[in-house]
Amino acid sequence: MNKKEIRVALIGAGRIGKLHGDNILAQFPGVKLAGVASVPMEAALEWTRQKGIERVTEDYRELVNDPEIDAVLICSSTDTHAEIIIEAAKAGKHIFCEKPIASSVPRIVEALEAANKAGVKLQVGFNRRFDPHFAKAQEMVKDGKIGDLHLLRITSRDPEAPPVEYVKVSGGMFLDMTIHDFDMARFLSGSEVEEVYASGAVLVDPAIGEAGDIDTAVIQLKFANGAIGTIDNSRRAAYGYDQRIEAFGSKGQVAVANVPESNAVLSNGEAVVGEKPQYFFLERYQQSFIRELRDFFEAIEKDTPTPVTGQDGLEPVLIGLAAALSVKENRPVKLDEIRQQFGL
Amino acid sequence: MNKKEIRVALIGAGRIGKLHGDNILAQFPGVKLAGVASVPMEAALEWTRQKGIERVTEDYRELVNDPEIDAVLICSSTDTHAEIIIEAAKAGKHIFCEKPIASSVPRIVEALEAANKAGVKLQVGFNRRFDPHFAKAQEMVKDGKIGDLHLLRITSRDPEAPPVEYVKVSGGMFLDMTIHDFDMARFLSGSEVEEVYASGAVLVDPAIGEAGDIDTAVIQLKFANGAIGTIDNSRRAAYGYDQRIEAFGSKGQVAVANVPESNAVLSNGEAVVGEKPQYFFLERYQQSFIRELRDFFEAIEKDTPTPVTGQDGLEPVLIGLAAALSVKENRPVKLDEIRQQFGL
Amino acid sequence: MNKKEIRVALIGAGRIGKLHGDNILAQFPGVKLAGVASVPMEAALEWTRQKGIERVTEDYRELVNDPEIDAVLICSSTDTHAEIIIEAAKAGKHIFCEKPIASSVPRIVEALEAANKAGVKLQVGFNRRFDPHFAKAQEMVKDGKIGDLHLLRITSRDPEAPPVEYVKVSGGMFLDMTIHDFDMARFLSGSEVEEVYASGAVLVDPAIGEAGDIDTAVIQLKFANGAIGTIDNSRRAAYGYDQRIEAFGSKGQVAVANVPESNAVLSNGEAVVGEKPQYFFLERYQQSFIRELRDFFEAIEKDTPTPVTGQDGLEPVLIGLAAALSVKENRPVKLDEIRQQFGL
Amino acid sequence: MNKKEIRVALIGAGRIGKLHGDNILAQFPGVKLAGVASVPMEAALEWTRQKGIERVTEDYRELVNDPEIDAVLICSSTDTHAEIIIEAAKAGKHIFCEKPIASSVPRIVEALEAANKAGVKLQVGFNRRFDPHFAKAQEMVKDGKIGDLHLLRITSRDPEAPPVEYVKVSGGMFLDMTIHDFDMARFLSGSEVEEVYASGAVLVDPAIGEAGDIDTAVIQLKFANGAIGTIDNSRRAAYGYDQRIEAFGSKGQVAVANVPESNAVLSNGEAVVGEKPQYFFLERYQQSFIRELRDFFEAIEKDTPTPVTGQDGLEPVLIGLAAALSVKENRPVKLDEIRQQFGL
């Protein structure tokens, strides 16, 4: 195998940054983790030392502008994503960026234009598409196993509500949590969302309501292909992380159930007792984080489009804004209304 | 056991009438099937002869006004239900009436008032409440096993669309098919529906659309207790009768999956292959038809309220009208708007 | 339909006799329950009165010799079965006999010869063959869905051990309980058992051991077709009635899991909790009792062989004797050794 | 964390050796893969180069006797295991050895004595104990969740028979394949096997029979604690790798089903179709290979006993020999008979 090594810089070494870094070290012998940027630098040093990563800096621009670097993984805080994308694109680096690209639509558009103009690869971190279970279901839909899609259902419930302080700066549940489900809706249906009707409620924690957000929601979607979708969300499922999908069509249905912590089932004098679903995204989506990078690196190697494009990063934000407006005004909202608002 | 025998007249001996008649004969030794009314009479004769039922008439009034009769089971065509309820109430008979009571709200109200005034028992044939699986789930919800209800989901899909000729006179999918799900929504939530938003589509058979109806729908419900519900319907699921529910609350979730035709599972070189769900309501809800009668007869014997009251027969019709209006005008519709329309 | 009515006499009106009687009344309009024999007669009277059965006698011979009777259902105590079979055969009646035909092999052979000589139908009450789940599995095996059978596994565990007084007269666990599994082994494999190795233990209740019996066993079977089978038994499973089978072959496997009391599954902060298996044979095998009679009556109507022949009644007894000898001498026992013992 | 780094040498770089090596590199930052021995050396070079492993040799003694090395992982061919254990023990290295330690009982005993005398850790590679599903089941048994063990069942079927050339040198199915199940039987029961009765057959491939081996077997085990166990094996399950266990006791049962390739389930006009079990041990037992090393390294760090001792490496071989003798002579064989044969 004579493939050129891909040299990657990691920008941001928080939980998700370290996760990607560890995956690169463990899973991709042909990829070199050539540097890490962290502010403050100290936060990253124990990890980089332990993993033998030699180059660590506080200034991501050093890495972005280093001609030895081929690609950047942007895992810093959301408000820095667009800026780094624009700089990295100018420097001709391929870009993997954690979701969302930005909380402002014009800023996202700007970042996409920069990447587009520079002709670099851009992949957004919607990892759930790469979950082997969901990917298999999507493959079945795409292969016509269920015929034409009629109904789509996504259940997505977290095991614990985040701290209220986080909720306040999260951009709201739709942009923080449901955004993954909006992406899954587009991914599974192979179609665009045209209209949204959403109901929101504060049923988990009154403090979330006081912070101006909701913690429970049902979102109804109308797709361009005629199908109808439903997403239901809760910030807290007592039994843990509930991540299921169903796609129903003219020839049948494909469904994905939760993955239990183990397959051990106890039958006793009371009941038949199975284990709870895997607790949270680090367990449930472990494989998906590896596979999204695998496909990113493959897109670079083979010079093919990335599997989650910049546009895929923009659309869920637009759907999220439509959903928020729908809850606020209790009416169905067309995506076109949101697009026009931003001159898209 | 010295319980007085209950003497029942069956009015209408079509598919569902015969089903109830057979169940009475087979399951309730303390209940006497004392007469059958059928128009035309000939349609019932093979069955009544075979079952040794001696009294058959074309004129249901004969039975309604027979002092020997304690109760009537109304299984005739929908347009006759209200009239018979009113007459039976006047005659002091207890009444089990197949759903719906009528397609017109004022007519339903009139029938309920007649029964109420006469002080007779009235039970409406929402049999799914008596399905052992759903009844168990409802019991868990009622017993607080899932805490406060947050989300409710009902999936209800038929194996085959009815003939278009039937669709034309059915009153529309919401009143013909979803009405069961509206009842289940009230039953499972223990709460009233306050607002409805529904999306309808014609995805199964264009002829249904030409007949002015829909064949696919998602209905979102807001309950008085703050919970949000979703019903999804299709007139045709390729894999058969799909009847599932989920109730999610502050302490957990209860879910009921489909019942397969058998538990035999084949693992071969291709897949792990299970059987399809039980084909249609006669198989899937076999037990529920027996249990609803059991509880009706028990309400008579013990002089307790029936488990599905006249009001339970009215509410789903109001929800259905709200859903139809919601699809027509693509907006959420409050139940109060429908109630005011009828002065309720 | 001009089928002649089949007139049946029920001999023995204990639990299983009444069950068959009720099923005839409820399920078979073309069959007349023409008389019941019960010793003492009083034991049957409440039931026969309630069901409107007019003819009740203490002397089964009255019924056996009544030219109006076509068939007898023998549900009296085991020690009377052979005698009644012989008399009924002489009288030309078709015979459905509860298992086992007798506890003595020569007596069984005598009964079979009588029925055979008289040319009457004889069916033995191995009802599990008619369970829809197991019947489906057997059909798959017969249809070659798993190719050639290699391994067969039967799990059969009761929810509660019987009273020790019953154990003492039961003929031992192999002839009382496992006999159903021996029949299933022959039914599912479509082959004869040639050799048995069995391990028995007293793990549930020491009193059973003191009564000379075992309460836990694993029985290994070698079939004529080369397959190897395993049966495991316990007199007491804490979670209820455990009835499962697996057949594994060159092309795959078919398995039947337990049937839960309901499909309701609760997910809470502790676990994912399903219901226990249906409690005991009256629930689990409800359908099978109806279906075995259906096929018995059909064999009479169409003059075809019964689906469970007299020979099918003999073989499991021989296997049971081999198993008992195997436990006693801790060695594999060939069926031929048992046959020779009885000159078969 | 100031833990001393553990320096490990890998002896043998075939499939399983590389698997362990990769796991060390990816999962254990505190462990250094300090050298690899491979004969011929060339076979390992592509892998070691790719992974940046600098020290590679043909002579494992170099590594065994290097004072910088703390522990060796023996993954070379079975016939070399005992020799290397003895040398490594003399050199004071901790030892992880792939199963089996040797095919000759006296040789195993010799190796165990050497390790024992040297006071080094010795762990045998029975990885299935570390499978999260089976480990959870064992934990439940140990914690008394099922009460006293009565019945144990292990199903272990491979997706494909190995090449006949391999079969010829494998030591026979019991020592090559069932040995894992014998270990699981001891692990799950927490008890010793006292007697074995086994039936073997050639049903998959006649060539295996011609090579003097069997390809299908059922093995019955009597445990010291009174429980009865069953193992069933096939060299070829059409649907893939079938790895299940059940433990039944006085208070209930714990069972572990297969892990499907994905949770996606397709319902169509024919059936409800799930995916096959994960194909083979590399997928199914992926986690177990990591966890066995984790516990080995932990035993070194904390100076605690290893979770799979040398004795655990010997016992399954004795059970395998008893099973082989049982098939040969068609009789139950006590483990004591085998022990006496070797003066144990």
Image: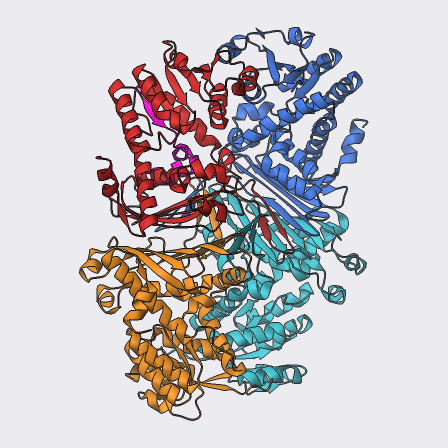
Chain colours: A cyan, B blue, C red, D orange
Nearer the observer, D216 or D235: D216
- Which residue does the image show at 51% across and 65% down from the upper left? A287
Corner quadrant of residue D204? bottom left
Check residue C139 for magenta coloring.
yes
Q: Can you say whether D289 is above or below D67 in the image?
A: above
| In-image side of B103 versus D239 (left or right) | right
> Which residue is farthest bottom?
D67
- Which residue does the image show at 31% across and 50% down from the upper left? C329
| In-image side of D222 versus B227 (left or right) | left
Residue D153: x %, y % from top left: 41, 55
Which of the image's four quarters has the C terminus of chain C? top left
| The residue stretch that appears in magenta | C119-141
Corner quadrant of residue D35? bottom left
The reply to whether residue A139 is visible in this rendering is yes
Residue A105: x %, y % from top left: 67, 63
The reply to whether residue B171 is visible in this rendering is no
- Which residue does the image show at 61% across and 52% down from the upper left? A155
Check residue D195 for magenta coloring.
no
Which of the image's four quarters has the N terminus of chain C? top left
Nearer the observer, A184 or D90: D90
Residue C66: x %, y % from top left: 38, 10
